[in-house]
Image (cartoon, rainbow, N blue to C red):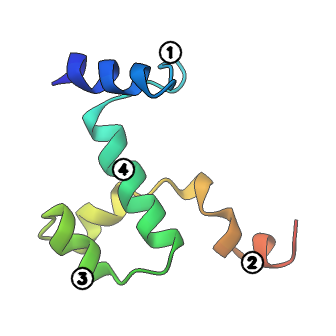
């Protein structure tokens, strides 16, 4: 699966680096992070990503990428 994901990403012009590797886990975490950024409720995200526990699902959220919803982000910092 790893080779397929990297091949498809490469075809789309997305390159994997050692700092930002492309992986199935990364795609899942990216999906969950983006869904949270868009304000999708936890239950819907959990249902789509087949997570059974909210704390497990929340561990996949990339906090650094949710600046827009933070207090600092709302202040434009």
Q: Secondary structure at mark 4?
A: helix
Task: Report how far apart the C-alphas of labels 2 and 3 lie in the structure.
Answer: 24 Å
Q: Which residue is mark 4?
A: 29
Q: Residues within 10 Å of mark 2 (few under 14, many from 20)?
A: few
Task: Report how far apart the C-alphas of labels 1 and 3 lie in the structure.
Answer: 33 Å
Q: Earlier in the sequence, mark 2 or mark 4?
A: 4
Q: Which residue is mark 3?
A: 43
In this picture, is 39 found above or below 76?
below
Q: Residues within 10 Å of mark 1 (few under 14, many from 20)?
A: few
| Nearer the observer, 72 or 33 | 33
Give coordinates of residue 11: x percent, y percent: 40, 21
Q: Residue at x 45, y 71 (%)?
A: 36
Q: Earlier in the sequence, mark 1 or mark 4?
A: 1
Task: Report how far apart the C-alphas of labels 4 and 3 lie in the structure.
Answer: 16 Å
Q: Earlier in the sequence, mark 1 or mark 2?
A: 1
Which quadrant of the figure has residue 77?
bottom right
Q: Earlier in the sequence, mark 1 or mark 3?
A: 1
Task: Report how far apart the C-alphas of labels 1 and 4 lie in the structure.
Answer: 17 Å
Q: Which residue is mark 1?
A: 18
The reply to whether dot 1 and dot 2 touch (C-beta < 8 Å) is no
């Amino acid at each position: 699966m790893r080779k397929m994901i990297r091949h498809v990403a490469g075809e789309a012009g997305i390159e994997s680096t050692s700092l930002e590797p492309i992986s199935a886990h990364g795609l899942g975490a990216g999906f969950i992070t983006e869904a949270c950024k868009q304000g999708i409720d936890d239950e819907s995200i959990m249902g789509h990503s087949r997570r059974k526990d909210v704390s497990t699902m929340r561990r996949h959220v990339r906090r650094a990428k949710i600046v827009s919803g933070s207090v600092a982000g709302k202040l434009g910092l």
